[in-house]
Amino acid sequence: MARRVEFLEEARQDVLEARAWFETRGVAATFTAELERAIDQIAQLPEAWPLYSARERRYLFRRLHYSVIYRVQGEIIVVVAVAHERRRPGFWRGR
């Protein structure tokens, strides 16, 4: 059974900023599809992706240099960040 996925407000902002950037390049649909695939897979099997820190796990996008950083908190998955893999590494720590 899929678990519920919630986004921290900062993670929602990450998504909006990334989508805006991809829109300027005409590939926002690719970003959106990758994000939806990530969330669907994380919801189904949250422990399938490796630990990234003591509390967070990381799902890497297939086609873009982005990842979803998330925590499993009981039956809820909390997305902490949607992060570019090369820009500002670890900016989300402390969220």
Image (spheres, rainbow, N blue to C red):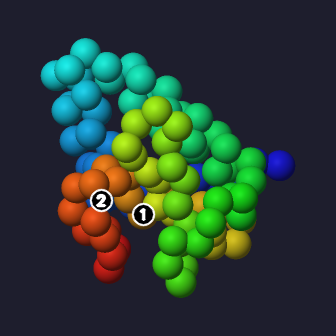
Task: Give above or below for 67 relative to 30.
Answer: below
Gap between marks 2 and 1, in whole Å? 7 Å
Residue 2 in the image, given as x and y percentages of width and height? 75, 48
Which label was assigned to residue 80?
1
Residue placed at 72% from the left, 58% from the top? Answer: 48
Q: Which residue is nearer to you in this view: 73 or 54? A: 54
Residue 51 in the image, given as x and y percentages of width and height? 59, 72
Residue 84 in the image, given as x and y percentages of width and height? 31, 50
Whether residue 19 is visible to the viewer of this picture, yes or no, is yes
Instruction: Name the kind of residue labelled 1 in the image.
Output: Val
Circle 2 packing at 10 Å, graded few (<14), some (14-19), many (20+), is: some
Query: Image quarter for residue 55?
Result: bottom right
Residue placed at 47% from the left, 53% from the top? Answer: 68
Whether residue 12 is visible to the viewer of this picture, yes or no, is no
Residue named by callout 2: 10
Element class at badge 1: strand
Quadrant location, the C terminus: bottom left
Residue ranking furthest to the right? 1
Element class at badge 2: helix
